[in-house]
Image (cartoon, helix red, strand yellow):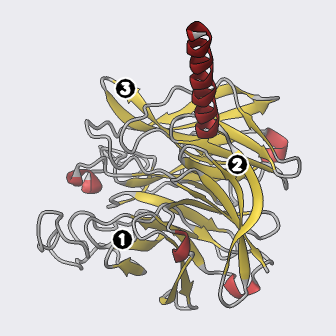
Amino acid sequence: MLIHKIKNSQILKAVIVCCLLFCVNTIVYSYQTIYQDKDNQFIVEEILNGLGVPWGMTFLSTHELLFTQRDGKIGLVDLKQKKLIWLKNTPSVYQNGQGGLLDVMVADDYAQTGWIYFTYSKSLKNQSTTALARAKLQDDSLINWQDLLVSQSLGETTRHYGSRITFDDNGHLFFSIGDRGHRPNGQDLSTHAGSILRLNLDGSIPDDNPFVDQKEKLPEIWTYGHRNPQGLFYDKDNKRLWSIEHGPRGGDEINLISSGKNYGWPVISYGKEYWGPVDVGESTHKEGMEQPVKTYIPSIAPGSLLVYSGKAFPQWRGDLFSGALKLQHLNRVVINSDLKAIEEERLLNELYERIRCVIESPEGWIYISTDSGRIMRIKPK
C-alpha cells in the first residue's frame, strides 16, 4: 500500500510539472477584443501571447505575418488558419543585453525575389557588432542566408545596436545602428556606430552616398550623430525618411533624415546625465547640426516608428506612430505641412505594455508587439 501511494504521488507530481511546463511554453491564439477606446474609434484584438520578445514584424502576404524574437527564433503566423510555424535553419545571434535577433523587413519586390532582410547582433573578435543579412523562405526553413554587411561597430558593451530597416522606392535599403554605448562614435565617421546607413538591396554601396570616396569616412553612412535609433521609416507617399531615437535621461528625438547631415549626438542633446541634473553635451543647438522635429522630456523610450498611410483610419493618415517602452503606450504624433510636430496623443496606456514594434497591415490595421510576448492589432470598431 505504501509503495502504491509513493508511486501515485510521484505520478501526480510529474503530471503537475508537465502541466506547468505546458502552460509556460504554450503559444495562445485568442483573436479576442481586449480593449476598446473611449471614443469608439477602434478596438484592440490579441492575436498571440506566450511568445518571447517579438522584436520585428513584417507581412509576407495579406495573411502571413513573419516576426523575429530577440532570442533568435523566427515565427510565421498564418492569420487565416491561426497557425504558427517556427522556422528552421535560423541564424546564430549574439543574445546578450540589448543584443539578439532584431528587425525583419521585406521590400516591395518580395513577390518577385523572395528576399527577407534581417538585422542582428553578431559575435566577432570576442566582441559584438550589428549585421545586416538576407535570406529566402522555403517551406518552413530559411535558405541562402547572406550577411550583406557586418558593420564596423564593434563594442565591448551590450547596448545600442539599433536597429531598424526600411526601404525607399528607388531600390535602396536604410538601416540604423546605435552608438554602442560609446558616445564619441556619434561624431566618428570611421565607424558605423551612431549612424543610419544606405545600401543597394544587394548590399553594394550606392554611388551617390554622401561620403563615397572620402578618405577615412565609411561610404555606407547616410547620416551620423545618432545615439540609438530604434525606429526608422521611409514615407513613400511624401518621399521622406524619418527616425526616432533614444535620448539619455530625457531627449528622445524624432528626426527628418537628409543625406549627409549631422544630428548632433553627443555634442548637442536635450537630455540629462543619468547620474545627475546635468545637461549632456555642449548645448541643445550648434551650427552645422540638425534640430529634431520633436523631443520627448521625459523619455518615452521609443521602440519603433510607422508613418500611417492606410484606409482603415483615414483620420490618422500621415501621422507618426511609435511604440513606447518605458512609458508603456502607443505614441501618435501629428505633423503639419511645415513638417512641425503640432499634436501628440498617447494611446493604449491602460494595457501597461512595453510596445516594441509597430507595423501596418495590408488592410490598414495597426499591429503591435510587446516585450511581454504578445502580438495585437488595432482595428476600426
Residue 105 can be seen in this image = yes
Residue 278 horizontal/vertical position (percent): 11, 72
Q: Which residue lies furthest to the right in this view?
A: 81
- At label 3, counting other C-alpha atoms closer than 10 Å, the crowd grade (few under 14, some 14-19, many 20 or more) is few
Mark 1 or 2, nearer chain start: 2
| Amino acid type shown at disc 2 | Val
What residue is rendered at 19% in x and 71% in y? 272
Q: What residue did someone put label 1 on? A: 252
Q: State left or right for residue 275 relative to residue 80.
A: left
Element at label 1:
strand
Are the residues flagged by discs 1 and 2 in contact, CB closer than 8 Å?
no
Disc number lying in front (1 or 2): 1
- Name the kind of residue labelled 1 in the image: Asp
Q: Quadrant of residue 234?
A: bottom right
Question: Disc 2 or 3, which lies upstream in sequence?
Answer: 2
Q: Which is nearer the N-term, disc 1 or disc 3?
A: 3
Quick one: quadrant of the C terminus?
bottom right
Q: Where is residue 375 in the image (x, y as percent from the top left)?
A: 65, 56
- Spatial CA distance of label 1 from label 2 is 27 Å
Q: What residue is disc 2 on?
A: 106
Query: Looking at the picture, does residue 192 appear above or below residue 367?
Result: above
Under circle 3, the secondary element is: strand
Residue denoted by label 3: 124
Crowd around label 1: few <14 · some 14–19 · many ≥20 (10 Å): many
Which residue is found at the position 79% from the left and 77% from the top? 312
Q: In this view, does 124 lie to the left or right of 120?
A: left
| Residue in the picture at 56% in, 42% down | 69
Label 2 residue SS: loop
Q: How far apart are marks 1 and 3 (CA)?
A: 30 Å
Location of residue 175 in the rendering, given as x and y in whole percent from the top left corner: 51, 51
Amino acid type, mark 3 = Leu
